[in-house]
Amino acid sequence: MPAEELFRIRAATPADKRGINLISVLEGMGAFEDIVGLFVACNGDGDVVGFIRVEDHGGVAYVHPVAVYPTWRGHGVGRALVACAFEVSPRVALVARGGSVAFYRALGFKDATWDELDQTVVGECDGCERRDECQPRCMKIDRAGR
């Protein structure tokens, strides 16, 4: 079955917060207080199976974070969610958890330095008690060819 028949992507609504926060907590992140910049992937029943937050910082779309419910991984949800970032800008950047680096590389992302990314975004990793476990890696892609 094609991915577009398994789920659909749309802007998050307040009714999606419960599903977003369930996935967020499963991934070891805190709950989201607002839905600004959030897009969700929903299954045929309307349940949230993944989400992404995209924020524009100086013409660069920052992904922070993308998360998919474990049983929905491998069905194209993450790839479809990341595509939302390119609707904001052809220049996309993020801080990937070590375990997700291969996923982003498969999408064409390249390693970046901490200095290349907006410090208000990457600054959250400074002093994080889970940094050693997370092994964060800065990554970026520029589909505009700049």
Image (spheres, grey):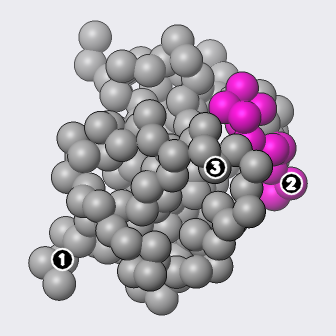
Q: Nearer the viewer, residue 120 or 44?
A: 120
Label 2 – label 1 distance at C-alpha: 33 Å
Q: For the residue marked with disc 2, what is the amino acid?
A: Glu
Q: For the residue marked with disc 1, what is the amino acid?
A: Ala
One can see residue 60 in this view: no
Per the image, label 3 sits on a secondary structure element best described as helix
Q: Nearer the viewer, residue 139 or 71?
A: 139
Per the image, label 1 sits on a secondary structure element best described as loop
Q: Is residue 139 above or below residue 13?
A: below
Label 1 – label 3 distance at C-alpha: 32 Å
Residue displayed at 51% across by 46% down: 135
The range drawn in magenta is 24-34
Left or right of residue 78: residue 126: right
Residue 144: image tag: 1
Per the image, label 2 sits on a secondary structure element best described as loop
User: Residue at label 3?
Assistant: 131
Q: Do the numbered discs 3 and 2 sit on residues whose CB atoms are within 8 Å?
A: no
User: Residue at label 2?
Assistant: 33
Residue displayed at 48% across by 88% down: 58
Q: For the residue marked with disc 3, what is the amino acid?
A: Arg
For the residues carrying marks 3 and 2, which lies nearer the camera in this image? 3
Q: Earlier in the sequence, mark 1 or mark 3?
A: 3
Left or right of residue 128: residue 59: left
Q: Is residue 141 above or below residue 106?
A: below
Other residues around mark 3 within 10 Å, as few (<14) / some (14–19) / many (≥20): few
Quarter of the image that includes the N terminus:
top left
Residue displayed at 58% across by 69% down: 122
